[in-house]
Image (cartoon, helix red, strand yellow):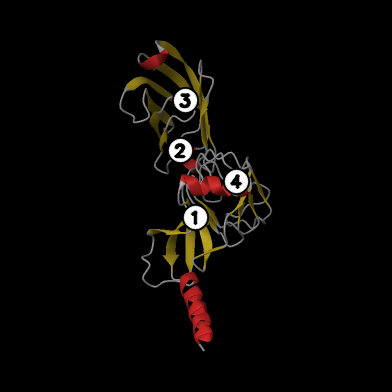
Amino acid sequence: MKKKLCFLFGIVLLITCCSYNPSLIYNRVYQYGNYKFKQLDSHSVSFCGFASDQAAQTAQAVSRTFVIPETIYGQPVTKIEREAFMSSTLFDQIVVPKTVTVIGRAAFYNCSAKISASGNILRDEGHLSPLGDNANNEGNNNGNGNHNGGNNSNYGSPFEQYVGQYSGTYSISGGGMGQQNGNWRGVVDKSGRMTVTFDNMPQSFSPILTQTGDFSSDGHNGPPLRGSIRNGHVTGVLFDTPAFQQQMGTFEGHRS
C-alpha cells in the first residue's frame, strides 16, 4: 500500500511540475532547468536563452548542434525572445522547433551558428534575420511573413522608408585612432538589416536599426556608434568606449 501511494504521489508531482502553473505572471522571465522562458499566455511560452553561461557551455559539450526545446514547463515554445542567441559562438547549428511562429528582435544577431527552422515563422521582428544569409529554412513562403530557403517576403516592412544605399563623409579627431577623415558607405534592406563601411577601417558595421530610424552598434566589430536616418539624411557619432561616453568623431551623408 505504501509503495502504491508513493507511486501515485510521484505521478502527481511529475504532472504538477510539467504543467502550466496559473501563478506564473505573463511576460516575466522564469528559469526552468538550464533554460529561461517567459509565460506568454495560458498556453504558450517563449525561449529566452540559457539560464547561465555554464548551462550554455554544458549544452555545447553535449553537441555542437543545439535543438531549442518544443516545450518548456509543459507549454509549447512559440517564440524565440529578442537577443536570445545574440553574439553566440558556441554552436555550429541551432534548430528552431516547428512550434515557433515568432522570432524576436535580434534573436540571432551576430550569431555564428547556422539556423534551421522547419516550422512556419509568421513574424520576424528583424535585424540579421535568422532565416536570412546565415540560415537554412525548410518551411514554405505563403506571403504572410513566412520564409522559404532564407528569403524574406518583407511585405509591409516597417523599414521600407529607409531602404537604399547611403554614402557620406566622416571625421575622427579623438580616441586611439588619431586624426582621420574619409568616406563611408552603407545600405539598408527591407528587413531592417543595416551595414556600414568606413574607409581605413577593416571592419564592416552592422548597427541595429529601429523603426524610428535610429541606429546603434555596441562596438563588437569596431568603434561603437550611434546615429539616425531622417528623410534620407544620416547623422551619427563614433565613440571611443562601449558605454557611449567619449566621443571621438562624427559622420553624415545621404541616400544615394
- Disc nearest the viewer among 3 and 1: 1
Among the two numbered marks 1 and 2 on one chain, the one whose residue lies closer to the N terminus:
1
Type of amino acid at the residue the image marks with label 3: Gly
CB within 8 Å, label 3 to label 1: no
Distance of mark 2 from mark 3, alpha carbons? 14 Å
Side of 171 where 128 appears, left or right: right
Nearer-the-camera pick, 14 or 91? 14
- Disc nearest the viewer among 1 and 2: 1
CB within 8 Å, label 4 to label 1: no
The 10 Å Cα crowd at callout 4, few under 14, some 14 to 19, many 20 or more, is: few
Type of amino acid at the residue the image marks with label 2: Ile
Among the two numbered marks 2 and 4 on one chain, the one whose residue lies closer to the N terminus:
4
Please tell me whether residue 11 is drawn above or below residue 144 in the rendered image: below
CB within 8 Å, label 1 to label 2: no
Among the two numbered marks 3 and 4 on one chain, the one whose residue lies closer to the N terminus:
4
Which residue sits at x=62%, y=49%?
A: 62
The 10 Å Cα crowd at callout 3, few under 14, some 14 to 19, many 20 or more, is: some
| Residue for badge 4 | 61
| Residue for badge 2 | 208
- Report whether residue 115 is seen: no
Q: Secondary structure at mark 3?
A: loop
Among the two numbered marks 4 and 1 on one chain, the one whose residue lies closer to the N terminus:
1
CB within 8 Å, label 2 to label 3: no
Please tell me whether residue 6 is drawn above or below residue 56 in the rendered image: below
